[in-house]
Amino acid sequence: GDLFEGSNIDQQMVSSVKKYIGNLKESIVAISPGNHDYVSLDSPFQDKDWPDNTIIFNGDFESKVFHDKGFAIHGFGFESTYVREGKIAPIREEHKNLINLCVVHGDLVSGLSESTYHPITEKILQESRMDYVALGHIHKRTEILRTGNTYYAYSGCPDGRGFDELEEKGVYLGWVSKGRADMAFVPM
């Protein structure tokens, strides 16, 4: 989420991002539009010319299944600045033997706390039965956390957005399997 800072993005930048993603030929890139770059009529995510290796979650929670590769990617995209209810759904029975990854933008909250940026609780994560949930929205990384059999983390943003974000930035890289997430933080 928040791949772009808004929907009114310079077309040259959008083209550059598409070209970069297209060059990642052996990879699948999943995008969960967030509160800054939500899916709207003028959103770059409405373009039809994104590379074939790109998944863009538009609206409701959905799943993209890759039976030949043994995994599924789940997610949803913001359709406005605010999402006040949790959208993560439990995996379907027919997906239980796959590696289930979730890419989602939102606020990790405790108990009955509220958020206008897609509230996510540990209970929601645990009940999802996902193997790994990649969280976006918060620019500061967390360690790889676990609730039940679901691993999850904020990787933060790969590059600081201002003088208030001077801590080490990067991405998580590693392996996810049933009951295990061997991932390490890689500084950028």
Image (tube, rainbow, N blue to C red):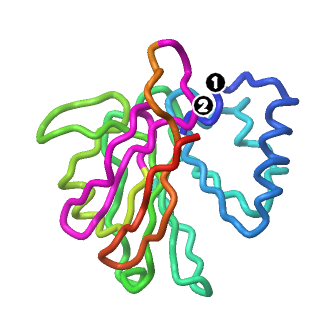
Question: What's the amino acid at mark 1?
Answer: Gly
Asked if residue 104 lies left or right of residue 65, the reply is left
Query: Of residues 117 and 145, which is closer to you in this image?
Result: 145
**Which quadrant is the C terminus positioned in?**
top right
Q: Secondary structure at mark 2?
A: loop
The residue under label 2 is 37
Task: Identify the residue at horizontal 18%, vertical 55% (top origin).
Answer: 123
| Label 1 environment density (alpha carbons within 10 Å; few <14, some 14–19, many ≥20) | some
- Give how far apart the Cα atoms at labels 2 and 1 are: 4 Å
Q: Is residue 148 magenta?
A: yes
Asked if residue 70 lies left or right of residue 24, the reply is left
Q: Main secondary structure of the magenta part?
A: loop
Residue 59 point in image, percent of width and height: 53, 47
Asked if residue 72 lies left or right of residue 16, the reply is left
Q: Is residue 17 magenta?
A: no
Task: Identify the residue at horizontal 54%, vertical 39% (top origin).
Answer: 1
Question: What's the amino acid at mark 2?
Answer: Asp
Residue 140 point in image, percent of width and height: 39, 32
Please say if 65 is above or below 22.
Answer: below
Residue 50 point in image, percent of width and height: 79, 51
Please say if 173 is above or below 96.
Answer: above
The residue under label 1 is 6
* CB under 8 Å between discs 2 and 1: yes
Please say if 37 is above or below 141.
Answer: above
Asked if residue 112 lies left or right of residue 19, the reply is left
Magenta-tinted stretch: 135-163
Query: Of residues 182 and 130, which is closer to you in this image?
Result: 182
Q: Secondary structure at mark 1?
A: loop
